[in-house]
Image (cartoon, rainbow, N blue to C red):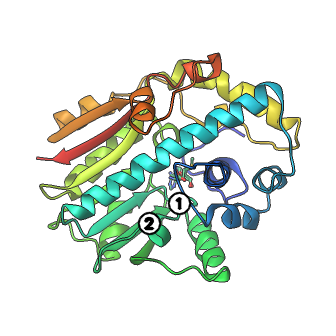
Amino acid sequence: MARSDTDSWDLASSVGATATMVAAARAIASAEPDPLINDPYAAALVRAVGLEFFTKLVDGEITLDGELAAGAELMTGVMAVRTKFFDDFFRSATNAGIRQAVILASGLDSRAYRLPWPQGTVVYEIDQPQVIDAKTATMAQIGASPTAERRTVAVDLRDDWPAALRAAGFDPTAPSAWSAEGLLAYLPPDAQDRLFDNITALSAPGSRLATEFHPDIAANLRERGNAMSEQWRQHGLDLDLANLWYAGERNSVAEYLTDSGWSVTARLRPELFAEYGRVFPSGEQAASQRNSQAIVAIRN
Ligand SMILES: C[S@@+](CC[C@H](N)C(=O)[O-])C[C@H]1O[C@@H](n2cnc3c(N)ncnc32)[C@H](O)[C@@H]1O
């Protein structure tokens, strides 16, 4: 179904199902030999959603072949690197003394339960209400406890989320660490700019921000999205990725943040792979992701 300005979802539908998709990739990446990441909650979180395709994937009950296998392998590798990138970002931010973190579009991210947050750290998670509620319930059911003070902010990121975040106790006068992981493509281009305007307004000097930017999303990923959705449909999963992403030109995040008063470092995805001792795949499926940038910014 096409996107609308007020659409909503749970973890089994629309944009919400993409949170389940990437959690499945984290579960699979965590179970690999010599894994780059360890997300011990991802598989249980995926099973609780109940989308059969992803449950069977994490339980090893589906064998993929051909293009679909190559696509799944690519996604698992990319998600492992992406997860480590954001994990390292938060570790570095807290090592620098930051004690409030904001995970935007938190989905099934389990960082509030698995990272070694220093005493006194508050982790805010923002996502749509059904997503927040489902994760909170599953984590409680499996007996997982947050490793920081976890505060959930159930709000749409197209609404007045800064007010909701402040109401939850966020202190804009203290430095903060922000992640926008797997989010930008699901916002229209102008909403992406507004998101960063809001973050900038809430960020005291020394605050940090990590995100990823995919310059080729409009052109290439739409085609890839269609191809992936078609293959998934053959396994009974109806998730129309290309229709969930917003096409159209968007501002370069690195430039936008620089102009907004941040010092920005951007690394291309293949560089990040190399840094973590992995080789970025050379196949055609990976081509559209070759120019993706992993961005860390520090507020001046
Ligand atoms: C691909 S998932 C990424 C989830 C998580 N960041 C991760 O990497 O595991 C996209 C997430 O963005 C959230 N999202 C997208 N648009 C949103 C919006 N307008 N308001 C709140 N959440 C949104 C979805 O609910 C979903 O959890």
Q: Position of residue 246 (x, y in %)?
A: 54, 33
Q: Nearer the viewer, residue 234 or 294?
A: 294
Residue highlighted by disc 1:
109
Residue highlighted by disc 2:
125
Q: Position of residue 205 (x, y in %)?
A: 12, 55
Q: Position of residue 167 (x, y in %)?
A: 33, 75
Disc 1: residue Cβ within 8 A of ligand 1's nearest atom? yes
Q: In this orientation, does residue 176 appear?
A: no
Horizontal side, residue 215 vs residue 6: left or right: left
Q: Amino acid at mark 2?
A: Glu
Horizontal side, residue 99 vs residue 66: left or right: left
**Residue found at x 81% / y 52%:** 60
Horizontal side, residue 201 vs residue 161: left or right: left
- Residue 93 location, quadrant: bottom left
**Residue found at x 67% / y 65%:** 45
- Residue 133 location, quadrant: bottom right
Q: Element at badge 2?
A: strand
The Cα atoms of the two marked residues, 1 and 2, are separated by 9 Å
**Residue found at x 57% / y 79%:** 144
**Residue found at x 86% / y 41%:** 63
Q: In this orientation, does residue 204 appear?
A: yes
Q: Nearer the viewer, residue 112 or 129?
A: 112
| Residue 159 in the image: above or below residue 85 | below
Q: Amino acid at mark 1?
A: Asp
The answer to whether the residue labelled 1 contacts the one labelled 2, judged by CB atoms less than 8 Å apart, is yes
Q: Position of residue 67 (x, y in %)?
A: 77, 25
Q: Element at badge 1?
A: loop
| Residue 75 in the image: above or below residue 222 | below
User: How many numbered tags mark residues here?
Assistant: 2
Quadrant (top left/top right/bottom left/bottom right) for the N terminus: top right
Q: Nearer the viewer, residue 35 or 282?
A: 35
On residue 183, the disc is none
